[in-house]
Image (spheres, rainbow, N blue to C red):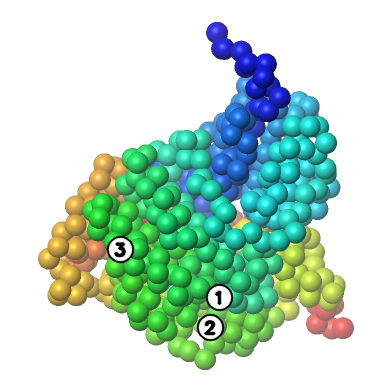
Amino acid sequence: MFAKTPFFLKRWQMNALLIYPEFPDTFWSFKHALEFLGKLAAQPPLGLMTVAALLPGAWKKRLVDTNVELLRDSDLAWADVALVSGMHVQRTSLVAIVERCRARGLRTVVGGPIASSLSWEDLKADHVVIGEAESIIADLARDLKQGTAKPVYQAMERPEMTCSPLPDLSLIKMHRYSTMAVQYSRGCPFNCEFCDIIEIYGRRPRTKAVAQVLAELDQLRAAGWREAVFIVDDNFIGNKARAKELCVALAEWRSQYKTSFDFNTEASLNLADDPELMRLMRDAGFVSVFLGIETPDESGLIAANKLQNTRRSLLDSVAKIQSYGMQVMGGFILGFDTDREDIFDRMVEFIQKSGIPVAMVGLLQAMPGTQLFRRLRKEGRILDAGHGDNTDDKLNFLPAMDATQLVEGYRSVLKRIYSCEAYYERVKLYLSRTQPRPSETNGRAQRTRQKWLTKGNARAFVTSIVRQGVFGKQRWSYWKFLLAVATRYRHCVGAAMTLAVMGYHFQVMTSRLSEPGESATLVGRIGTAAASQVRGS
């Protein structure tokens, strides 16, 4: 029997159901690699956890991440309001959730990045929140309780990160995720034409205080977390001075608690220009960084206003970062107006020489709200609002290159870079660049081996042997790679096995992409005909 809510609390209390939509199975989902670890998703919904902490303390809250659990009718029956947040790539799942809630008469609120790119009508919600939650939630909560909520709430300013609360960690099932998430900053100082981050969060990097970040790490540690933490900033080094300050504090924090936390993040390629920052990141425990490299063709970088990647050797920059013990994951784009027929071969050659194992190659997407979308719409080249996943073969604009040639070239790049031989060659090149220095060999390598020998990693190792080494189609390549690791890269066995498992995911996804669907073929035909008209006009 549940205790009744006291009458004097009913005035203030509501049952808030926070729902995170499902991600489609893409290159970015890592779904087939996570299965090796017994995990269901890469990271928890940090945005909704932060929103939950901003809601009135008297409210009851429940969070359902549909990537790791089912949204049940009993959850909907319990709730007074459903708050749904997501990104553009989650649109299909998000709209289905909203329609399911509204069919039951449950009020719905939609926020997150998707609310900045799609209209209120497209999202089908009762209420839409545009912008960052810290400056909006109090008014929204008051109006929801009083029954006077407006259709649209839009932030009039971008709040300072110092007012962001500790995310509510109690609402998630931590063991279902491979990585925990912490946000340090918002915004990026650059002005890339295709990027929606600068449109949503601005070009002035805003950061939390160091004490806020350490408090979040303390919270994770107290909850028993001992694995990787993703600093989810879109550009961790947008403010280099602040990033250095945080790295010093992280190194001290790790030393104080002798923690096994490793950090991953995203940054810009100009990280390679700052040896001090790379050293501080290494000492703070950063083991990987995602960089938007985009294309080896400088004319494409200039046209896309990715000027921070020009006037430099991209390969040398990547190698410098790798030499500090950080794995570089790279984002690459095909479909710029400047791309020529040789771009596919040039892309493969660059990726192989870079030693970037995780090379996320995608077709250019014109995201609503970006400079690129506005330009292409003005030129009459937009087909639709897109779907947020740039790693399938669907185009949402008319490319300068023949669309069929672009899509087939894209598929050929993926097939070549994710063949087992090519992939393992890149992994070995990366491992050769991260040999520990003599001064680090004794204690650090030993700690690395001990840290890797966890229950979850042991499970992943055994699963990898069975799926890739026993039943895998490329067994010979796999065993050749393991032999190389055992003889030449023993100091990196953890990283090597992690990358072997990730390779399995990429190979599964590449194999699926090799079988074009009807919708992709249709878009290709439309794009081919219309692009011919554009070129001929």
Residue at 80% x, 64% y: name it: 383
Point out the tag, 1 or 2, that comes first from the N-terminus: 1
Between disc 1 and disc 2, the foreground one is: 2
Asked which secondary structure carries label 1, the reply is strand
**Residue at the farthest left position:** 442
Give the residue number, with chain letter if any, for mark 3. Answer: 251
Q: Residue 309 bears which disc, if any?
A: 2
Would residue 104 appear left or right of 360 to someone viewing this image?
Answer: right
Q: 395 above or below 146? A: below
Q: Residue 337 bears which disc, if any?
A: none
Residue type of the residue flagged with mark 3: Ala
What crowding class fits label 1: few (fewer than 14 Cα within 10 Å), some (14-19), or many (20 or more)? Answer: many
What crowding class fits label 2: few (fewer than 14 Cα within 10 Å), some (14-19), or many (20 or more)? Answer: many
CB contact under 8 Å: marks 1 and 2 = yes
CB contact under 8 Å: marks 2 and 3 = no
CA gap between label 2 and label 3 equals: 29 Å
Give the residue number, with chain letter if any, for mark 1. Answer: 294
